[in-house]
């Protein structure tokens, strides 16, 4: 079963039979591989080749290829090992390549500097990519980072993050793609497909239900099967279908009492049986807990073995195969799955060069800037304060180190970007202190804005003193406050409030100058107690290495903002489904006791909170619309410098839901809109509003375009656990076309027949 969102509905005819059979349909400009006879033949040949190679490997070789090293901690380093995320030695006699792995989501992350002075192109936060609602851009971003990886001698990228945002304070939220399974699945799948277009492998991660960082290596995520299938797993399933990743990475946490990396239901039954996934499951670094259980439950490769408590897939696995507790056929299957990724991506026939190749960083920077420009979200623009007039004579920028750069998120996705880091602050405490740093990319908003308004007096104030900032803003034609909130892998933020007295800073500046705009560089939602006093707010996320230029282009109208929120922004912390963060208080108490010299510490006492995801499949906006809570900004919200009108709605039902309508640019400037199609569906756990389609449409003033969406049945179905299938119950399904979740610019009803779809 595939996902359908079309810009050119006339190019492919989609029938109810095709839907039921799961025939793929291209999305946007990025070509999705078609199930042609030639493609099927090539795939079958690659699969046979993987099987043949696995059979030709000796037992020793098979054991060697199912575990990888973490090079910075490896004692016996082969000559060709560079200091990176992972290394798996190949089998030269069979032409089986060594696997060289790099962290990847936002670029080729070289946090562990494998070469002195090495840099890479830094994309904006994945939330910015999601906010673009542009699958073609996701594909091209993947092509870009995959190309850089190959040029840097890597052939496996640990990319493809598809975990849904369930809690607004998730530390790793910025690496993922928001709260909706359709949007996350499409964007992750296209990014993976772009990476693998370079004949290298991308992972899909972190499988599954890993939405918090607090105690991520010990927590037990609890949820019922149907809800998980209809939410987080659906995002992964769509990404698997579109991207065909060579590898899937299992998560640190437990899922319903079993570690994700030894979870038979998750790995064997869902991923490999139900979805027919033929690639390999690699562990996250330090996520393995056993040998026999993990191998038999579907883990194919132990990654970064030095970070685990034991070398589980070394001698213990050899012994388990020898005594029959792990079948020899299972060991061969582990290798065959790894080789499936190696052969189907073309890596085996297009080996990565062993010496670094030239990279066109200027061209790649343009991709990064496009993501920042398309993914920035104009949250508020009262009185059309933006775009700024070039005639402004005095502009004051305040805070955020906007004189030198833009903020970046922390953790394994951190990229040492082209241009360097003008500000870098090491962490001294917290779970991420050993490997994360607070870093800015060298893309100065001040310099970019000065270039936009060469005749204006553009100054910068650091914002540490609200009174001084207010004095500087008073009398200016415009004051722009750059507000920051840093997030990182390994720890969640403890509050949604802006840190370091920034709320007071914004209040003071807005009180001194009514023409105040706020630019938010954050990795997720923040509280905005000052919102009513500020006419304009731009959500720039972590905007990447060309973020300063992108922000300036939007502020001055060179680029018309078009981003839409991929997650709900809560109005207060008590709107979050879990508050405070499960396990946080115990963790802090344990760490404090350990620092004080006590025995009550993380080493002596393993904290393992059970985290119930009681909202089930009603993630984010689905829950808000069900309960009637009013968020600060809804999922899908985002303003433009022009206006759009929708009309001509046509809704069809039967075996497949089809929705078509017109979009017209009624304003005076060109712009892109993202009309969103929602359906109210679900009988199992009560009706919920679900995103079932979207389309990014670029229109000139006065231009009209017809948009057509064929809805994937799974998006309006209930998952039937007993029958192991998706079920669309016969009946009426309300449909709305809107600008955000809950908007009903157009409304209609689809009358559906009873439809059942295999998982």
Image (cartoon, rainbow, N blue to C red):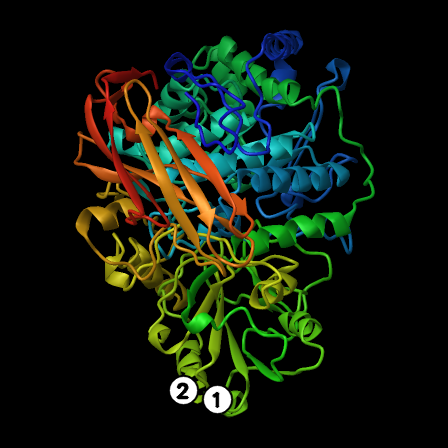
Dot 1: element:
helix
Front residue of this view, candidates 42 and 228: 42
Contact check, label 2 and label 1, Cβ < 8 Å: yes
Q: In screen coordinates, is 259 left or right of 724?
A: right
The residue at which mark 2 appears reads as 511
Q: Earlier in the sequence, mark 2 or mark 1?
A: 1
Quadrant in the rendering for residue 511: bottom left
Q: Quadrant of residue 755?
A: top left
Of 99 and 739, the residue lying toward us:
739
| Of 507 and 258, the residue lying toward us | 507
For residue 532, above or below residue 353: below
Crowdedness of circle 2 by 10 Å Cα count: few (<14), some, many (20+)?
Answer: some
Looking at the figure, which quarter contains the N terminus? top left
Q: How many marks?
A: 2
| Relative depth, front residue between 384 and 302 | 384
Q: Position of residue 283 (x, y in %)?
A: 50, 33
Q: Residue at x 47, y 80 (%)?
A: 515
From this viewpoint, is residue 210 visible?
no
Lateral position of residue 551 relative to residue 650, left or right = right
Q: CA distance from mark 2 to mark 1?
A: 8 Å
Residue 470: image tag: 1
Where is residue 466 drawn, in percent x and y?
46, 87
Residue 223 appears left or right of 328: left
């Amino acid at each position: 079963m595939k996902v359908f969102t079309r810009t050119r509905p006339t190019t492919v005819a989609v029938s109810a039979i095709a839907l039921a059979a799961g025939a793929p349909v291209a999305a946007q400009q990025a070509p999705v591989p078609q199930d042609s006879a030639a493609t099927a033949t090539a795939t079958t040949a690659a699969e046979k080749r993987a099987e043949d190679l696995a059979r030709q490997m000796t037992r020793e070789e098979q054991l060697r290829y199912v575990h990888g090293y973490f090079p910075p901690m490896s004692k016996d380093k082969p000559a060709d090992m560079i200091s990176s995320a992972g290394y798996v030695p190949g089998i030269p006699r069979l032409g089986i390549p060594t696997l060289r792995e790099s962290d990847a989501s936002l670029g080729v992350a070289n946090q562990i500097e494998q070469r002195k002075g090495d840099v890479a192109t830094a994309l904006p936060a994945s939330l910015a990519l999601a906010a673009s609602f542009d699958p073609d851009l996701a594909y091209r971003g993947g092509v870009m980072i995959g190309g850089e990886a190959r040029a840097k001698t890597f052939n496996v990228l640990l990319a493809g993050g598809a975990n849904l945002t369930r809690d607004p304070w998730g530390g790793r939220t910025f690496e993922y793609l928001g709260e909706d399974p359709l949007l996350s699945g499409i964007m992750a799948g296209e990014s993976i497909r772009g990476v693998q277009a370079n004949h290298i492998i991308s992972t899909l991660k972190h499988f599954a239900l890993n939405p918090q960082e607090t105690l991520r290596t010990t927590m037990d995520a609890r949820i019922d099967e149907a809800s998980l299938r209809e939410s987080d797993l659906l995002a992964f399933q769509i990404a698997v279908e579109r991207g065909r990743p060579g590898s899937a990475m299992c998560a640190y946490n437990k899922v319903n009492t079993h570690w994700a990396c030894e979870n038979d239901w998750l790995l064997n039954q869902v991923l490999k049986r139900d979805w027919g996934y033929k690639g390999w499951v690699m562990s996250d670094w330090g996520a393995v807990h056993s040998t026999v259980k993990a191998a038999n439950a579907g883990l194919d490769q132990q990654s970064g073995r030095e970070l685990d408590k034991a070398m589980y897939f070394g001698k213990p696995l050899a012994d388990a195969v020898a005594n029959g507790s792990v079948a020899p056929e299972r060991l061969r299957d582990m290798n065959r799955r790894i080789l499936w990724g190696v052969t189907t991506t073309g890596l085996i026939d297009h080996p990565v060069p062993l010496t670094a190749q030239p990279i066109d960083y200027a061209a790649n920077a343009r991709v990064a800037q496009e993501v920042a420009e398309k993914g920035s979200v104009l949250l508020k623009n009262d009185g059309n304060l933006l775009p700024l007039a070039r005639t402004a004579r005095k502009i004051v920028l305040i805070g955020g180190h906007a004189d030198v750069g833009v903020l970046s998120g922390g953790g394994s996705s951190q990229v040492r970007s082209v241009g360097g880091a003008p500000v870098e602050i090491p962490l001294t405490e917290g779970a991420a202190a050993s490997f994360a740093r607070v870093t800015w990319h060298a893309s100065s908003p001040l310099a970019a804005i000065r270039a936009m308004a060469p005749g204006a007096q553009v100054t910068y104030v650091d914002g540490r003193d609200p009174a001084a900032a207010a004095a500087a803003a008073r009398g200016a034609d415009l004051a722009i406050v750059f507000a920051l909130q840093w997030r990182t892998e390994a720890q969640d933020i403890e509050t949604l409030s802006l840190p370091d007295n920034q709320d007071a800073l914004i209040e003071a500046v807005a009180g001194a100058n009514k023409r105040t705009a706020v630019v938010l560089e954050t990795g997720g939602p923040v509280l905005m107690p000052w919102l009513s006093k500020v006419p304009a707010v731009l959500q720039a996320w972590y905007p990447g290495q060309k973020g300063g230029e992108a922000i300036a282009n939007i502020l001055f109208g060179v680029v018309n903002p078009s981003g839409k929120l991929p997650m709900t922004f809560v109005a207060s912390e008590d709107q979050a489904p879990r508050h405070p963060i499960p396990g946080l208080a115990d963790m802090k108490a344990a760490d404090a006791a350990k620092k004080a010299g006590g025995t009550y510490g993380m080493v002596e006492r393993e904290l393992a909170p059970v985290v119930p995801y009681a909202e089930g499949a009603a993630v984010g906006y689905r829950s808000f619309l069900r309960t009637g809570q009013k968020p600060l900004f809804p999922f899908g919200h985002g303003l433009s410098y022009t206006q759009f009108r929708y009309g001509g709605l046509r809704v069809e039902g039967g075996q497949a839901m089809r929705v078509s309508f017109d979009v017209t640019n009624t304003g005076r400037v060109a712009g892109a809109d993202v009309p969103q199609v929602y359906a109210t569906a679900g009988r199992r756990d009560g009706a919920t509003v679900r995103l079932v389609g979207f389309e990014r449409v670029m229109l000139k003033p006065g231009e009209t375009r017809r948009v057509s969406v064929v809805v994937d049945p799974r998006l309006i179905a209930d998952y039937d656990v007993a029958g192991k299938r998706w079920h669309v119950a016969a009946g009426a399904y309300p449909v709305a076309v809107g600008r955000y979740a809950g908007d009903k610019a157009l409304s209609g009803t689809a009358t559906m027949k009873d439809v059942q779809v295999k998982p």
